[in-house]
Structure formats: C-alpha cells, structure tokens
Image (cartoon, helix red, strand yellow):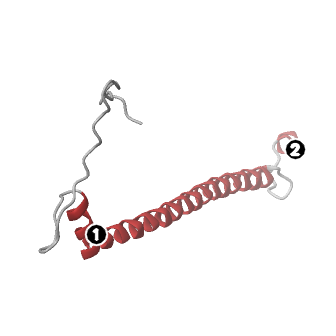
Amino acid sequence: MNRAKARRRFNLARSKLPYIFLALLLAYFAISVTTELGKLWYMQRNIADMEQSVRELRKKNEALWDKVKLLQSDAYVEKVAREKLGLVKPGETRVVPVPAAPEQGAPAPDPTIRD
C-alpha cells in the first residue's frame, strides 16, 4: 500500500500543464499577429509612396504632352524658323541688325566678355 501512495495518478485538472500550453499558444498568436501587422503597415506605407510617385509622374507626363503640343504647333514652328534659322515668308524682306562700329580711339569690346 505504501507503494500505491507513492505513485499518484496524473490529474489534468490540478496540473499546471494546460495553463503553460495556453500561455505558449497565446504568445505564439501575439507574435504572429504583431509580425503580420508590421508587414501590413509596411505595405500600406509602400502603397502610399507609390501613389504619390504616380501622381507626380502623371503631372510630369501632362506637362510633357503640353510641351509636345506646343512644339508641334504651326506657330511655334514658324517662330523657330524665323528666329533660329533666319527664314522669311515669300515677299518679306529679312533685316539683320549690324552691331555699331566702335568710335575711333575707343578700345574695341572684348568678345570673350559677356554682359
């Protein structure tokens, strides 16, 4: 009978094992949820940054399309042809301004110095 007393039966209801298991399970879930929330926050931040980039690129794209329309317009082509290429329409006379000659005794302007 001494031997029967020394060997007690395992009683799950009085054991701390279920509480330890529950605590470990809760810790695992807490770590998992925290990790996933961190990933979610990072992705949302990344999405916000990408949306901002898209807005900026759309504005830049719109400005470039406006410039393309301007460069393709007849008025701009004519302006460039007149100013940079020196072209004139038929019947017009081209006038080219000539720089004034320096007075006698005055030093000639240095062409390397610009105003």
**Which label's residue is closer to the chain start, 2 or 1?**
2
Q: Is residue 25 above or below residue 59?
A: above
Q: Nearer the viewer, residue 106 or 77?
A: 106
Q: Amino acid at mark 1?
A: Tyr
Q: Is 83 on the left-hand or right-hand side of 22?
A: left
Give the secondary structure at mark 1.
helix
- Dot label at residue 62: none
Q: Looking at the image, is mark 2 or mark 1 nearer the viewer?
A: 1
Residue at far front of view: 104
Q: Residue at x 28, y 69 (%)?
A: 76
Task: State the residue position of label 1.
Answer: 76
- Viewer-proximal residue, 95 or 35? 95
What residue is shown at x 35% (from left), y 26% (from top)? 106
* Residue in the foreground of this view, choosing between 46 and 102: 102
Q: Residue at x 36, y 29 (%)?
A: 113
**Residue 10 visible, this orientation:** no
Q: Is residue 103 left or right of residue 96?
A: right
Query: Looking at the image, can residue 26 be seen?
Result: yes
Q: Mark 2 falls on what kind of element?
A: helix
Pick the front one: 60 or 42: 60
Q: Please indicate whether residue 10 sits to the left or right of residue 46 in the image.
A: right
Question: Residue 111 location, x and y as percent?
Answer: 29, 30
Q: Are marks 2 and 1 in contact (CB under 8 Å)?
A: no
Q: Position of residue 17 (x, y in %)?
A: 77, 50
Side of 41 where 60 appears, left or right: left
| Residue that mark 2 sits on | 5
